[in-house]
């Protein structure tokens, strides 16, 4: 079982609004290996994005959460399923959104 936490404060590329984005936030993640073949993970994160430059006063609050399971079928083959949810609340019209993400992982090695 492993846990990790993180805090970040970093610049980021803009999506066309402002010169750049100042991101500040943090997150928690947890990975549990039930056996040598089966594991699951859970994560949650938050960030406050401040758009700077070009006279913008945009502020976004971004919430993200996710979970996944992984199965090591063979030594060279790993399968996984994951789900994530993102929510952005913005002070700019039409910039807020909700999104569900579903994924299937297939990893092989030789």
Image (tube, rainbow, N blue to C red):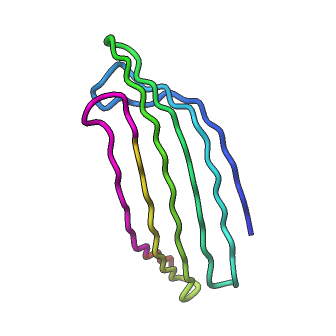
12 relative to 76 in the view: left or right: left
Q: Is residue 32 above or below residue 21?
A: below
- Quadrant in the picture for the N terminus: bottom right
Name the residue located 52 percent from the left edge and 71 percent from the top edge: 68
**Residue sitting at the far bottom:** 74
When asked about the image quadrant of residue 90, the answer is top left
Instruction: Magenta stretch: give its range.
Output: 89-105
The spot of residue 42 in percent (x, y) is 59, 64
Query: Foreground residue, 75 or 92?
Result: 92
5 relative to 41 in the view: left or right: right
Name the residue located 72 percent from the left edge and 59 percent from the top edge: 3
When asked about the image quadrant of residue 15, the answer is top left
Name the residue located 73 percent from the left edge and 64 percent from the top edge: 2
The spot of residue 29 in percent (x, y) is 64, 57
The spot of residue 39 in percent (x, y) is 62, 77
The spot of residue 48 in percent (x, y) is 51, 33
Query: Foreground residue, 8 or 92?
Result: 92
Count of picture labels:
0
Name the residue located 46 percent from the left edge and 36 percent from the top edge: 61
Q: Is residue 1 above or below residue 9?
A: below
**Residue sitting at the far right:** 1
State the predominant SS element of the stretch in magenta.
strand
**Residue sitting at the far top:** 55
């Amino acid at each position: 079982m492993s846990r990790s936490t993180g805090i970040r404060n970093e610049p980021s590329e803009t999506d066309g609004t402002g010169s750049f984005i100042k991101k500040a936030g943090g997150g928690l993640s947890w990975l549990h290996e039930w056996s040598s073949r089966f594991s699951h993970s859970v994560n949650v994160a938050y960030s406050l994005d401040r758009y700077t430059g070009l006279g913008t006063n945009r502020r976004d609050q971004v919430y993200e959460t996710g979970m996944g399971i992984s199965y090591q079928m063979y030594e060279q083959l790993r399968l996984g399923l994951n789900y994530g949810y993102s929510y952005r609340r913005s002070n700019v019209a039409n910039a807020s959104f909700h999104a569900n993400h579903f994924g299937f992982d297939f990893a092989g090695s030789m």
